[in-house]
Image (cartoon, rainbow, N blue to C red):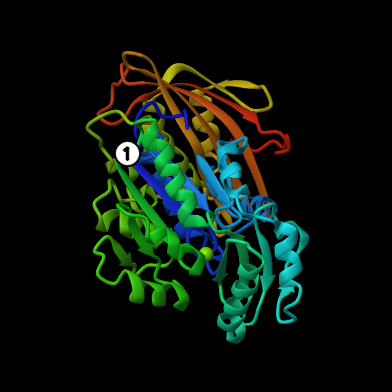
């Protein structure tokens, strides 16, 4: 992880299904709340790690369906695949470790003798993971018998039952817990051990995450019986693990507050964003705040007042330029005027805006270059603009915030060059 020069202030290691992502929240509000909190306050000095049972194929599918942020590290297939960054570069050292005492063909052959096991789809069979479905009632018994027969064949494997249906066979050294332990060891060797680590989960395959020493843990309110039972038997007296009262990503935000790991108020929970005055300039927060206001303006969730537009103009440099993704240039003030005319055009409609990968770089004593992905969801349609903004705290002639000097947007590949008003 070369993005950060030193230790991460906070590393969040979160499961996806029913933890970061709430499949019962069609508006994805808790996820969007987490996203705003993360990009405004943590992205610049912290690490986001997704640890999922999903294979790369199903993980990528989920990313298309839900407004998920881009993690710094992705651990997939129940801790058997670790990748880094946006381009998802695999960790070869981890592959080498997992190859020890592992023979996928032998595992498949032995497991095929159990008629109660139904093989999962081809995409879920991975180099270090063989996956089946098994009925909940039979899971314990089958796991025991299978474990015995694999041992007799000289294999050292781990069998994990999760979600009340998935049975995964992995090398003994694999799993979400060991993958995290491997990462922590790697950071320690580089002198970059995160100051705090928070693990988040809801089901059986997450249990291992909670047994790593010196991490904080949150079982979201909707955690499954299998995880709660594991906790009752193994970690009941650990004060660093809580069972949240909030579901999914809201439970993660709750845990950040409970363990005092840093700011825990999502900008989405702040009604009057102009009230957010900070002691220091925080470019990430400025960007999140602006796009949240933009969403609320178009959804008519803020008052239809000229005052809002006057305030916006006051923080735009008079000769500042906005470069539309189509290549057309206009002044920032004209951009604000155009935005003013869009008030309420998305009222009552599924319209959301969020930012991802906010990367601020200080390029002068009072000047920041901020790069990020701006996402807009309108009904079924989703579009992304790679965006660059120049902010300055020098030209400030109003009491709050910074001045916007320049905004440049480019369509992300495949995002479609459809003209949207702003
Ligand atoms: Mg889960």
Counting from the top left corner in percent of width and height, residue 125 is at 72, 59
Along the horizontal axis of the image, is 227 left or right of 142? Answer: left
Q: In the image, what residue occupies the spot 35% across and 48% down? A: 197
Question: Is the CB of the residue bearing disc 1 within 8 angstroms of ligand 1?
Answer: no
Relative to the observer, which residue lies in front, 11 or 124? Answer: 124
Relative to the observer, which residue lies in front, 325 or 253? Answer: 253
User: Would you place residue 122 above or below residue 149 in this image?
Assistant: above
User: Which of the 4 image quadrants contains residue 393?
Assistant: top left
Relative to the observer, which residue lies in front, 350 or 96? Answer: 96
User: Which of the 4 image quadrants contains residue 107?
Assistant: bottom right
Identify the secondary structure beneath mark 1. Answer: loop
**Residue tagged 1:** 9
User: Would you place residue 194 above or below residue 242 in this image?
Assistant: above
Q: Is residue 39 visible?
A: no
Counting from the top left corner in percent of width and height, residue 381 is at 68, 50
Counting from the top left corner in percent of width and height, residue 319 is at 47, 15
Dot 1 alpha-carbon crowd within 10 angstroms: few under 14, some 14 to 19, many 20 or more:
some
- The extreme bottom residue here reads 137
User: Would you place residue 330 above or below residue 351 in this image?
Assistant: above
């Amino acid at each position: 992880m070369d993005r950060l020069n030193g230790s991460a202030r906070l590393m969040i290691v979160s499961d996806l299904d029913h933890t970061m992502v709430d499949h019962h929240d069609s508006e994805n509000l808790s996820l969007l709340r987490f996203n705003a909190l993360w990009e405004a306050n943590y992205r610049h000095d912290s690490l986001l790690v997704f640890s999922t049972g999903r294979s790369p194929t199903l993980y990528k599918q989920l990313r298309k369906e839900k407004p998920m942020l881009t993690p710094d590290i992705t651990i997939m297939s129940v801790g058997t695949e670790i990748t880094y960054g946006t381009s998802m570069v695999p960790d070869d050292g981890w592959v080498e470790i997992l190859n020890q005492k592992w023979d996928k063909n032998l595992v498949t052959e032995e497991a095929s003798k159990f008629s109660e096991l139904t093989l999962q789809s081809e995409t879920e069979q991975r180099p270090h993971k063989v996956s089946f479905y098994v009925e909940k009632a039979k899971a314990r018994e089958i796991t025991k018998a299978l474990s015995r027969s694999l041992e007799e064949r000289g294999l050292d494997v781990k069998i994990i039952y999760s979600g009340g249906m998935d049975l995964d066979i992995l090398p003994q050294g694999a799993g979400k817990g060991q993958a995290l332990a491997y990462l922590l060891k790697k950071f320690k060797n580089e002198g970059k051990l995160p100051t705090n680590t928070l693990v988040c989960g809801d089901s059986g395959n997450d249990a291992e995450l909670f047994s790593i020493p010196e991490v904080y843990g949150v079982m979201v309110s909707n955690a499954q019986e299998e995880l709660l039972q594991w906790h009752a038997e193994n970690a009941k007296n650990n004060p660093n693990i809580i069972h949240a009262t909030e579901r999914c990503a809201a439970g993660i935000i709750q845990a950040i507050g409970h363990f005092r790991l840093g700011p825990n108020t999502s900008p989405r929970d702040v009604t009057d964003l102009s009230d957010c005055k900070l002691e220091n300039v925080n470019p990430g927060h400025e960007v999140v705040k602006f796009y949240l206001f933009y969403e609320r303006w178009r959804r008519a969730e803020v008052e239809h007042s000229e005052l809002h537009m006057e305030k916006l103009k006051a923080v735009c440099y008079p000769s500042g330029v906005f470069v539309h993704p189509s290549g057309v240039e206009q002044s920032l003030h004209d951009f604000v005027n155009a935005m003013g005319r869009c008030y309420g055009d998305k009222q009552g409609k599924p319209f959301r805006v969020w930012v991802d990968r906010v990367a601020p770089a200080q390029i002068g004593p009072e000047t920041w270059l901020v790069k990020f992905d701006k996402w807009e969801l309108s009904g079924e349609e989703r579009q992304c603009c790679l965006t660059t903004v120049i902010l300055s705290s020098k030209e400030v002639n109003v009491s709050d915030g910074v001045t916007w000097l320049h905004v440049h947007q480019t369509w992300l590949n495949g995002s479609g060059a459809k003209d949207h008003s702003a």
